[in-house]
Image: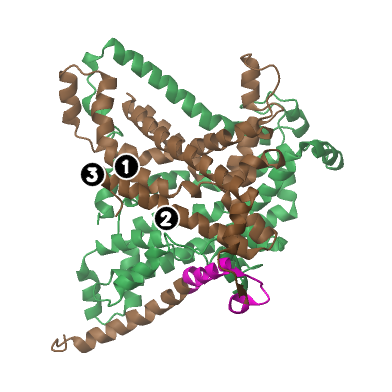
Chain colours: A brown, B green
């Protein structure tokens, strides 16, 4: 290295690269790593006045409080329920949609449907919520008008006031927004399946459904598995904006998620320690879930994330 | 590591040539051999796609119709795709509100400043990390990649920002998302694919790294920069939570999405809307105002949509890039 005749020059170049990279190191440390020290709060009787250095350590007291707190247990249940519903529908719907779209006969139709299907992905959660309010409204909401018109109900349903509907409303809203977008990756995978396989299958007399079942789905398997593993790790991350915006006092028992709990306890009530502990609980469970999913996939001899 | 230039067109989703198609069907569809089963399948599939499309479009078009309709008249219901009593009153009311005007300005500013600064800075980091001679490229990359998986969580982040003086400040819209690790990876992948000779010959001529980055590398990366910038812009335009969490006390820093959210919660209390109606100008209702505000808020997205279409699939396909 030192015998390199250009060493001096290299060092000079390196120096300017080093200088350029310093702000980036400082930035990431302050904005992404300094907050991690805040996790200490979860093990303290944290008082803002005393700060991290002088607050009293109380071990796992905050976590014990959480697990004795019925609100928290309820919120964990809601988060898991909505997360699992979203995981299942969020896997099935885009796959079905991608397959059906790829089977569409007219290219123009394909492109039009595809273009329209992505659109909601780019609209904000606020707009999504507004649309949900309008469509589900008691007065002239589209869904109620439709059901009344078809004679399926006698009087308008109060969709957002009934706890039993809430999870499904959230699930449907999420699917409305993301199905088209999520299907992109599957469509790409379908395009890369060898067309000879379909040719051979149809010569052997396999119908459309058989070809989908025996060629398209197996071809999608690796993609499905990878996305599934990634999404399992995100099961607890699905619940915040929609639930916060769509929720109201009448459905509080099913709409509140861990994130909303953190917001209410941490920011609302100013109990930073409890809020942080709940956040840590969520992170730890997410990590455990992704490790389990990955190990399972590996054990089954499938592709895995790492 | 897959190269953007190769993977993006290969996905065929942009579909410049129809023959590439989105699915396998085009390649094996043989008209003459359509069986009865095929015809049933195609018919059902077409019907499904029509219903799907209507499900997406109808609520949006209905919102537009309501926004152009007289507010009180809209309460009677029955408006579908065309306004019954046409008026611009809803828009006049929304645009005439001081808070909406401020919000629109802040939203535009945060989107422009946030996107430009984030894209430039992230590209510079990507450039540094794409230099093969840089001694600490592995360590610095790792420092950023970790942030994609680990974060302090709402409360610790909130406290740090508060201590940094980011509450009640415009900077909270710009600084926290300045260097997204994912964008950095996408840009770096692209830069790694550029020939080394470009930078080397410029260096021979005595150009420094900043000059090379600004004059040579950045312009060459335009396609991927556009992708990253569009994603950042949409994220900036659509975010509302930061405005609520950090700047709710400061009316001058409110954003369109946050104002729209406040309108949402005022509509939720429909019972009280009858009272507010009496006080405001005759024909405007909270619902009709919200419809107009929603249309205004989504307008930039709709205008940008053709561009988003062109670039987002490329962006998503690079999403498959693993470290």
Q: Nearer the viewer, residue A131 or B94?
A: A131
Which mark lies nearer to you, 1 or 3? 3
Q: Which residue is mark 3?
A: A301
Q: In screen coordinates, is B298 left or right of A85?
A: right
Give residue A214's position: percent from left, percent from top: 24, 27
Q: Nearer the viewer, residue B292 or A147?
A: A147
Q: What secondary structure is the magenta-colored segment mainly? A: helix
Above/below status of A36 relative to A221: below
Q: Is residue B269 visible?
A: yes
Q: Is residue B226 magenta?
A: no
Say if mark 2 contacts mark 3, CB within 8 Å.
no
Disc 2 and disc 3: Cα gap in Å? 21 Å
Residue B99 lies, in percent from the top left, at 72, 55
Q: Look at the image and tell me whether residue B317 can be seen.
A: no
Q: Quadrant of residue A10?
A: bottom left
Residue A47, magenta (yes or no): yes
As measured in the structure, the alpha-carbon distance from the residue carrying label 2 to the one carrying label 1 is: 18 Å
Whether label 1 touches label 3, CB < 8 Å: no
Residue situated in front as seen by the camera: B151 or B106:
B151
Chain designation of label 3: A
Which residue has dot 2 on it?
A287
Which numbered marker is on residue A281? none
Subunit ID for the residue under disc 2: A
**Residue positioned 23% across, 44% down in the render:** A301
Asked whether disc 2 touches disc 1, contact meaning CB atoms under 8 Å apart, the reply is: no
Residue pictured at 26% horizontal, 49% vertical? B7
Give left or right: position of A20 versus A190.
right
Q: Is residue B237 above or below residue B201?
A: above
Q: Secondary structure at mark 3?
A: loop
Q: Quadrant of residue A220?
A: top left
What range is drawn magenta here?
Answer: A30-54
For disc 1, the marked residue is A225
């Amino acid at each position: 290295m030192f015998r390199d005749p250009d060493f001096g020059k290299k060092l000079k170049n390196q120096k300017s690269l080093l200088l350029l990279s310093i702000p980036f190191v400082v930035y990431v440390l302050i904005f992404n790593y300094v907050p991690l020290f805040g996790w200490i709060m979860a093990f303290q009787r944290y008082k803002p006045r005393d700060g991290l250095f002088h607050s009293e350590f109380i071990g796992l007291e905050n976590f014990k409080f959480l697990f004795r707190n019925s609100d928290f247990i309820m919120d964990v249940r809601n988060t898991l329920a909505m997360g699992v519903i979203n995981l299942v529908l969020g896997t099935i719907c885009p796959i079905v949609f991608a397959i059906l779209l790829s089977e569409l006969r007219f290219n123009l139709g394909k492109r039009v449907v595809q273009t329209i299907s992505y659109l909601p992905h780019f609209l904000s959660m606020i707009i999504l919520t507004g649309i949900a309010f309008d469509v589900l409204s008691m007065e002239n909401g589209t869904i109620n008008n439709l059901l009344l018109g078809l004679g399926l109900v006698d009087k308008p349903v109060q969709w957002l006031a009934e706890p039993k509907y809430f999870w499904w409303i959230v699930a449907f809203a999420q699917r409305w927004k993301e199905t088209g977008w999520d299907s992109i990756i599957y469509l790409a995978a379908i395009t890369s399946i060898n067309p000879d396989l379909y040719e051979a299958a149809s010569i052997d007399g396999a119908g459309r459904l058989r070809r989908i079942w025996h060629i398209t789905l197996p071809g999608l398997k690796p993609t499905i598995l990878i996305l599934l593993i990634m999404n399992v790790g995100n099961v607890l991350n699905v619940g915040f904006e929609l639930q916060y915006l769509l929720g109201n006092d009448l459905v509080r028992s099913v709409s509140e998620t861990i994130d909303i709990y953190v917001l209410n306890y941490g920011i609302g009530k100013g109990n930073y320690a409890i809020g942080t502990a709940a956040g840590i609980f969520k992170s730890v469970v997410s990590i455990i879930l992704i490790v389990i999913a990955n190990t399972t996939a590996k054990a089954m001899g499938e592709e895995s994330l790492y | 590591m897959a190269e953007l230039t190769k993977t993006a067109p290969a996905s065929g989703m942009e579909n410049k040539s129809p023959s590439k198609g989105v699915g396998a069907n085009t390649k094996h569809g043989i008209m003459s051999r359509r069986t009865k089963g095929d015809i049933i399948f195609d018919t059902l599939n077409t019907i499904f796609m029509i219903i799907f499309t209507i499900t997406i479009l109808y609520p949006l078009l209905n919102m537009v119709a309501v926004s152009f309709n007289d507010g009180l008249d809209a309460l009677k219901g029955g408006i579908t795709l065309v306004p019954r009593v046409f008026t611009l009153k809803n828009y006049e009311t929304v645009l005439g509100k001081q808070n909406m005007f401020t919000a629109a300005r802040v939203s535009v500013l945060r989107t422009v400043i946030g996107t430009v600064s984030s894209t430039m800075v992230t590209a510079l980091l990507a450039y540094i990390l794409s230099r093969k001679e840089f001694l600490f490229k592995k360590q610095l990359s790792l420092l950023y990649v970790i942030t994609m998986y680990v974060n302090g969580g709402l409360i610790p982040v909130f406290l740090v920002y508060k201590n940094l003086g980011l509450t009640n400040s415009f900077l909270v819209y710009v600084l926290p998302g300045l260097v997204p690790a994912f964008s950095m990876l996408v840009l770096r992948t692209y830069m790694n694919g550029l020939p080394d000779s470009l930078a080397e010959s410029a260096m021979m001529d005595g150009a420094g790294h900043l000059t090379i980055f600004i004059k040579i590398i950045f312009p060459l990366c335009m396609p991927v920069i556009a992708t990253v910038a569009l994603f950042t812009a949409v994220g900036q335009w659509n975010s509302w939570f930061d405005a609520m969490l950090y700047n709710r006390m400061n009316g001058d820093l409110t954003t369109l999405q946050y104002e729209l959210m406040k309108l949402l919660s005022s509509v939720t209390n429909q019972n009280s809307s009858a009272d507010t109606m009496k006080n405001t100008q005759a024909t405007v209702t909270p619902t009709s105002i919200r419809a107009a505000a929603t249309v205004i808020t989504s307008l930039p997205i709709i205008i940008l949509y053709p561009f988003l279409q062109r670039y987002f699939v490329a962006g998503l396909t690079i999403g498959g890039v693993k470290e």
